[in-house]
Image (cartoon, grey):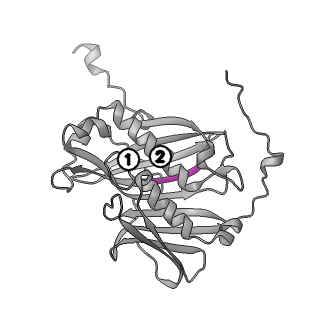
Amino acid sequence: MHRNLLKKKPLKTKSMNKYTKSYNVILDNMDLLEYRLRPISAIMYLQDAFARYTATKGMAAYDLFAENLYWVVAEINIDFTDYLPFWSEEIKVELWFSEISKLKIYIDFYIYHKDQVIAKGNSLWFLISRESKRPVKADKVAEKFEVCEELAAGGHQKFEIPPTTEVYTKIEHTNNLSDTDFNKHVNNKSYINLAEMTAPDEFKRTHRLKNLHIRFNRETFLGDILTCTANRTEDKNTFTHIIEKDGVSACDIVTAWDENTSNDNIVDYNLDVKNER
């Protein structure tokens, strides 16, 4: 037998099935009180990296439009560390397809700052038919993307709304043009912004977001009136944010917080700002 036939093929490493993209924290995505990355803005970078990754395989939103399909994210679960970078600092998003079943598509991810993980989690996606508005088989995704079985958060957590003890606050919002996205329905950022608005400001000044778990239940559109209710749980550090249209939930969000013990301040922090020409 020829010696070459005895050679084993090189195994693919996990990193070969991952996609990475670097970003700088910009003004729109930082907390204006602390000049740090807003935790909810980390999700925007995550979704941008996902869009870029799918574009490399010809499966971006504009590619799917011709096939009467579109991407929908159904859930996002993300854990944050105690540290979030300041304005202008660089972060890196690393993501991969961790599971592709008949319909469900899981994306796991890490977000790094200076090679340290500052956030990790997973998200659940579907391919949706524009005609039926229902999920279609993920065969096309499985053909294009290889699976890396690494789980950033140790598993794909089931979304559960914890029991609450009190209604903390309630607001109404009429969807406007700036709320809509490529698919002409209200984008994810608008739901998250609504939830953040219902979290108490005094509480946010003394606490940092530890975990954010989101479940998107149904689409809403331009002109729809949404009601967002924030409820507090028994431990006082967890809130549920229920966003409804006509009494039916469009989005459920659970936020868990830790006391903020950091003394880092933008005034005495040595920012590494590059001189760009």
Q: SS for tag 1?
A: loop
Q: Is residue 137 left or right of residue 265?
A: left
State the image coordinates of residue 96 (x, y, percent, origin top left).
Answer: 40, 42
Which of these two is toward me, 71 or 223? 223
Q: Residues within 10 Å of mark 1 (few under 14, many from 20)?
A: few
Three-letter residue code for mark 2 = Leu
Residue furthest left in the image: 132
Q: SS for tag 2?
A: helix
Which of these two is toward me, 148 or 189? 189
Specify whether residue 154 is in view.
Answer: no
**Residue located beneath label 1 in the image:** 149
Q: Which residues are magenta?
A: 117-122
Mark 1 against mark 2, which lies toward the viewer?
2
State the image coordinates of residue 246 (x, y, percent, origin top left).
Answer: 32, 74
Q: Is residue 52 left or right of residue 211?
A: left
Three-letter residue code for mark 1 = Glu
Which of these two is toward me, 224 or 186? 224
Compared with 251, 108 (above or below) is: above
How many numbered discs, if any? 2
**Residue located beneath label 2 in the image:** 46
Residue furthest right in the image: 268
The residue lying at 38 percent from left, 47 percent from top is 149
The image quarter containing residue 206 is: bottom right
Q: Is residue 158 left or right of residue 86?
A: left
N-terminal label among 1 and 2: 2
Compared with 172, 183 (above or below) is: above
Q: Does the magenta run of residues contain 273?
A: no
